[in-house]
Amino acid sequence: MQPPDYNPGWQAFQHLMTEIDVPAKTILLREGEVSRQAYQILRGCIRLWFNDNGRDITFQFFFEGQGVSSIESFRTGRPSLFYMETVEPCTLRVITKADFDKMLAEAPGFKELIEASIYQRLEHYFALFLSRIRDTPHQRYLDLIKDHPEIIRRVPQHYIASYLGITPVSLSRIRNKTDKTRR
């Protein structure tokens, strides 16, 4: 299976990546550790989260075809501000920092792809930030259904509640209310 952004010019660099299978609920990176690897998801889902006084707060999900790392830590060597954990069993391509830098310097189009990915992630964080200020939890849930139905289908409810900034009980109420109005 080739990712959607696959570029045949990168075949010369495929040996730099290792394919691994990882069970669900595997911590790939802990908050406070330095990120030494980046991942491309071939199958599965990964969530990013941080610990807030004993509560885990989910702030992003990644699915097939997407790359994921603690980019700030990976790039600078500073400790990660969050955890990276598989939600489902995953098949991942893994690349080390040194090999990533080699690809960045030598693979045709790779730098542009990474730049586009970083901008996309920045746009996601900006929209999430504004949504938390502007929208009600119910509106955030409706937007999630419309914009990211794969999250609703594939991610456990307690992670979705955390992502929306609400409790699982509140999410259940919102879902019940939404289901009644959709009938």
Image (cartoon, grey):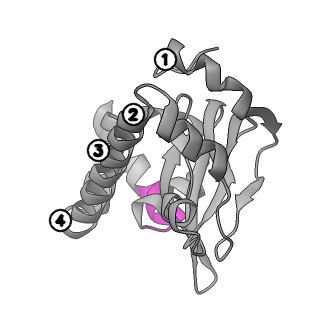
Instruction: Please name the residue that numbered disc 2 is placed on.
Output: 113
Mark nearer the N terminus (1 vs 3): 1
Separation of disc 2 and disc 3 at Cα? Answer: 27 Å
Q: For numbered disc 4, what is the local secondary structure?
A: helix
Q: Which mark is residue 134?
A: 4
- 128 is higher (above) or lower (below) than 77: above
Q: Residue at x 64, y 73 (%)?
A: 31
Mark nearer the N terminus (2 vs 1): 1
Q: Quadrant of the C terminus?
A: top left
First to last magenta residue range: 166-173
Pointers 2 and 1 in contact (CB under 8 A)? yes
Please provide percent x and percent y for residue 99: 65, 43
Label 4 amino acid?
A: Arg
Instruction: Please name the residue that numbered disc 3 is placed on.
Output: 143
Q: For numbered disc 1, what is the local secondary structure?
A: loop
Q: Residue at x 62, y 34 (%)?
A: 41
- 131 is higher (above) or lower (below) than 92: below
Label 2 amino acid?
A: Leu
The answer to whether residue 155 is seen in the rendering is no
Location of residue 94 (image quadrant): top right
